[in-house]
Image (spheres, rainbow, N blue to C red):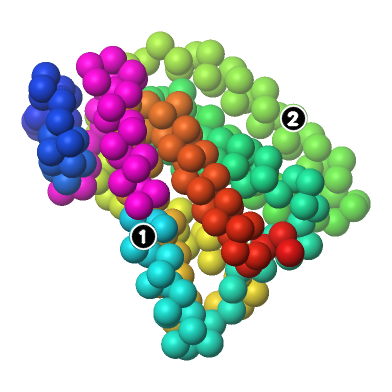
Amino acid sequence: MQDISADMTELSPRLTLRTVLCDFRDFLRRPAVLDPQGWSAGGGKHWAVLTALLIVGLIGVLLPFLGAWQKLFSLPSPTAFDNFDKRWLVPVTVIFAPIAEELLFRGWQRGSASSLWLMLCAILAGVTVGVMTDASQALIAAGVLLALLIAGIAGWVLLRKRPAPMPWFARIFPWIFYAVAAGFALFHLSNYPRFSLLMVPLVLPQLWAALVLGYLRQRLGLAQAILTHVAANACSIGLALASGSIGS
């Protein structure tokens, strides 16, 4: 089977706004595991264009639409930060959350055996914490978590030199990409006090962000996706603080 990433591995040597946007459009039409180019070959300009596109889409298009949607259907605003210590509001939303979310949702999307193994161990650890909530199970939970930590490190050491992506991962990556983007968006419904189908459009900003960040992760690298996530969150939280919608 032909490698689905073969026709998207290199950018045009003459990097322009049009080539960046066309490459992004082509990727969304056919998501593929790429060889990240980092800051080389115009990577800085590529990053700046996509970061600006993400922020303009969020603040200039989606947030006004969502404000009207909330007002039309009398939907609640996010309550995730209502009881949040204001001293930690900016560091958590601007630094810690982008790093954690990128590692969780896109850190493994190169499809290497080692990264997929680490993700599996992390999922099992999360399930363990979620299931073993009784105090009497604390010792068992600690033992399972320790075993998963050891297994994660050992597996990474053994698998880290295997080539990426794994063939099966590359074949189904378009499905993985869009499933993760949808999951990333729906995950943010937890920011609201209640759920209804009318609230699904409220996470369109997160869906838009997932598409841009997923592309950046493949085209430039995980670090670039994290930096864009940081910039977008900084703009969003700054706007919210300025308007008094949170932190008042």
- Residue 217 position, x and y percent, is 36, 33
Residue 118 vs residue 77, the one in the foreground:
77
Kind of residue at disc 1: Gly
Q: CA distance from mark 1 to mark 2?
A: 46 Å
Residue 75 picture quarter: bottom right
* Amino acid on which the number 2 mark rests in the picture: Leu
Q: Which mark is residue 60?
A: 1
Q: Are marks 1 and 2 in contact (CB under 8 Å)?
A: no
Query: Please, which residue is most extreme toward the bottom here?
Result: 73
Q: What residue is at 31 percent from the left and 39 percent from the top? A: 50
State the extent of the magenta-drawn residues as a range.
28-56
Residue at figure coordinates x 63%, y 67% from the top left: 245
Query: Which label number is shown at residue 102?
Result: none
1 or 2: mark nearer the eye? 1
Locate the C terminus and report the quarter of the image it occupies. Answer: bottom right
Vertical placement of 137 versus 71: above or below? Answer: above
Tell me the residue at 90%/53% (across/down). 135
**Residue highlighted by disc 2:** 146
